[in-house]
Amino acid sequence: MTKINSQKLKHEQIQYIEFLSKDIVQAKNFYTTCFGWKFTDYGVAYTSFTGDYVDGGFTNGVPVKGSILVVLFTEDIEATKNKVVKAGGKITKDIFSFPGGRRFQFTDLDGYELAVWTN
């Protein structure tokens, strides 16, 4: 696991997420292209990532649909949606309004569904 910057940690907040991936290289390319995550490889079966507010990893395995929904924040929802589509993501719920702002949902190349929101 990546050494976590303790200044980013908040009491009882999510600080590390691990995904299963059928193709770790593909996952790294997708998330680097869309969100600028930085990766560190630990052999061929595991890679960790660092984002601005959460760290995590990808390990070899078959993704399970319908698990926890990861929600990312963006300052420009249209630009983020365009990056997701250009990188090969599939939009599952187009941009919609909700009481806290606007969001969309997509699946990545492994089939995980994530959401992106803005206020």
Image (cartoon, helix red, strand yellow):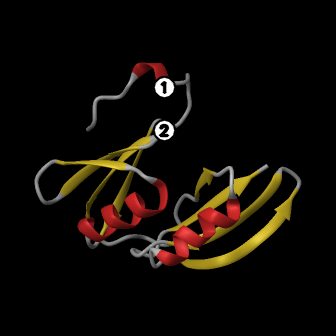
**Residue 59, percent from left and from top:** 26, 58
Residue in the image at 47% along x and 62% along y: 34
Indicate the position of residue 8 as horizontal and vertical percent values: 48, 26
**Does 43 appear above or below 20?**
above
Question: How dense is the environment of label 2, judged by Cα within 10 Å: few (below 14), some, or many (20 and up)?
Answer: few
Q: Tell me what residue is drawn at x 46 percent, y 19 percent.
A: 7
**Residue farthest to the right?**
99
* Residue 62 screen position, x and y as percent: 31, 72
Which amino acid type is shown beneath numbered disc 1?
Lys
Residue 44 rendering spot, x and y as whole percentages: 12, 59
How packed mark 1 is, by other alpha carbons closer than 10 Å (few <14, some 14-19, many 20 or more), is few
Q: Amino acid at mark 2?
A: Asp
Q: Secondary structure at mark 2?
A: loop
Q: Is residue 66 something one can see in this rendering?
A: no
| Residue placed under numbered mark 1 in the picture | 8
Q: Is residue 30 above or below residue 41?
A: below
In the displayed structure image, the side of residue 2 where residue 51 appears, left or right: right
| Pointer 2 residue | 52
Tell me what residue is drawn at x 46 percent, y 72 percent.
108
Q: Residue 13 appears in which quarter of the rendering? A: top right
Q: Secondary structure at mark 1?
A: helix
Seen from the viewer's position, the closer of residues 59 and 102 is 102
